[in-house]
Amino acid sequence: MAEQKHPRAYKNIIVLVSGGGTNLQALIDAQERGELGSGKITCVISSKPDAYALVRAKNAGIPSRVIQRKEYPDTAAYSAAMLEAFYEEYADLIVQAGFMTILDETICRAYPNKMINVHPALIPSFCGKGYYGLHVHEAALEKGVKVTGATVHFVNEICDGGPIILQKAVAVQQDDTPETLQRRVMEEAEWKILPEAVRLFCEDKIKVQGSKVLIQA
């Protein structure tokens, strides 16, 4: 494994993707505006070779890798390959941005409080196993909630269970469909709080105490 200790002026951000990459684009746009603090997206890793997120990375001049789940016999082997890639890329922060492949606990142990995920609901509502993509918004509408939103949290061994960094609420409209709600949650919450959480991390303004996150001014 590559040695990670070497001097540089910025923190390396590795973004994990599986699909269209809208949250990746939000991060790229924020970076171009100078809003990621001392962080820089240095690599995008996709679990699928045809993910449009790879096109977004290429257009932004960001190196990418494809590590397909089907090429590995089990989750442990796949996680080991991903971990090796993180070391090779000198990862300081790992961002799951629509990454739909399961990694095991070895990743969390190697990068404690250094991997974040954005979830399209206000955790602890509509989260955990089975709550992803449109399923989250379908559940919210079925329950009849008046407010939903998005959460950025650290990743640990529990699905959607890591310390919460930021949350933003979004009002539910009476005529919402899962698709319209999904879009509004992305536009009004996910694309705002994910880059902000990355900036706070890269500027060393996040402190974790147990299950709580303290943000320094």
Image (cartoon, rainbow, N blue to C red):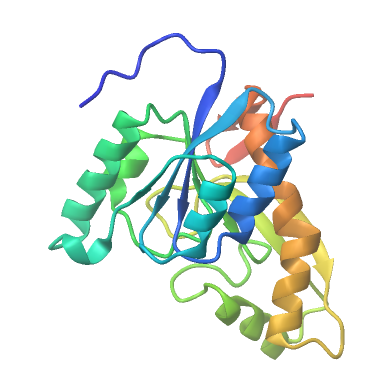
Say left or right for 72 vs 10. left
Toward which corner of the image does residue 111 lie, by quadrant? top left
Image quadrant holding the C terminus, namely top right
Horizontally, is 194 left or right of 108 in the view? Answer: right
> Which sits in the foreground, 59 or 189?
59
Q: Which residue sits at x=59%, y=43%? A: 60
Visible residue check, residue 148: no
Residue at point 66% right, 79% down? 137
Instruction: Using the image, determine if residue 49 lies above or below residue 57.
Output: below
**Residue 86 spot, x, y in % from top left:** 34, 36
Q: Where 156 sits versus 47, above or below?
A: above
* Residue drawn 72% across the image and 41% down it: 30
Residue 128 percent across, percent down from the top left: 48, 67
Name the side, left or right, on which 8 lies relative to 190: left
- Farthest left residue? 73
Q: Residue furthest top?
A: 7
In the rendered image, the quadrant that contains the N terminus is: top left
Residue under the image location 12 percent in, 63 percent down? 73
Against 12, is 9 above or below? above
